Image (tube, rainbow, N blue to C red):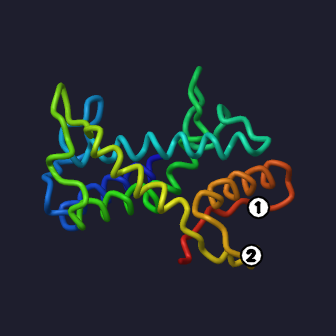
Amino acid sequence: MGKESIIWQEFYKSINKIITTFDFTGRKFRPPKDELNALISFGNSLLYGTILTEIYNTYLDPTISYLHEPLERRFSLTLDLAEIFKPIIVAKTIFKLVNKKIITKNDFRKEVGYYLNTEGKKKFIKEYEELLSKTVKHPTLKRNVTIRYLIRLEAYKLLKHILGDKEYKSLRAWW
């Protein structure tokens, strides 16, 4: 967890070099303190739901994890797998939406913190679903699979590792 935390801190430090439309002073949530934190929180919540759905298509228990500490009523395995897919799915979605000005300051509402309004949510979900539906040629399967299916394949790799069939190696984006 320590290395993972350091990597995310470095990533968050570099966001202002990639996105100049919004000010980002660091990761702050509950509530999100700015527009980018709102986008990250919304994207992460969508990703957690997507991963949980894909885990349910395997024999894995989403409450038993290897990276995040299991807690009562927490799907820790979802959090573990999300660490692999946040940069590939959530960050990529945010960068496209903001840099192409698909999402602007008008797509947020400010209450206690910043949140996407209904129109902003629609834009984010549309781009998110399009990315999940994108297909890539899988190097081992030798066929096209969706990004969404890569999540399920990652869960299957964990299952094979647990069963002792094959050592687990996390996904490395090749596309």
Type of the residue with mark 2: Thr
Residue 79 percent location from the top left of the image: 53, 41
Residue at image location 56% in from the left, 33% down from the top:
69
Residue at image location 55% in from the left, 38% down from the top:
68
The residue at which mark 2 appears reads as 140
Viewer-proximal residue among 5 and 31: 31
User: Does 58 sit above or below residue 103?
Assistant: above
Residue at image location 50% in from the left, 51% down from the top:
83
Type of the residue with mark 1: Glu
Compared across the picture, whether 140 is left or right of 31 comes to right
Q: Earlier in the sequence, mark 2 or mark 1?
A: 2
**Disc 2 residue crowd, few under 14, some 14–19, many 20+, Cα 10 Å:** few
Viewer-proximal residue among 1 and 171: 171
In terms of secondary structure, where does tag 2 sit?
A: loop
User: Does 168 sit above or below residue 40?
Assistant: below
Query: Residue 71 sits in which quadrant?
Result: top right
Compared across the picture, whether 21 is left or right of 100 comes to left
User: Does 127 sit above or below residue 115?
Assistant: below
Q: Nearer the viewer, mark 2 or mark 1?
A: 2
Residue 117 percent location from the top left of the image: 25, 38
Residue 61 percent location from the top left of the image: 72, 35
In terms of secondary structure, where does tag 1 sit?
A: loop
Compared across the picture, whether 36 is left or right of 52 comes to left
**Disc 1 residue crowd, few under 14, some 14–19, many 20+, Cα 10 Å:** few
Query: Residue 86 sits in which quadrant?
Result: bottom left
Viewer-proximal residue among 171 and 142: 142
The residue at which mark 1 appears reads as 167
Q: CA–CA distance between discs 2 and 1?
A: 15 Å
Residue at image location 47% in from the left, 62% down from the top:
88
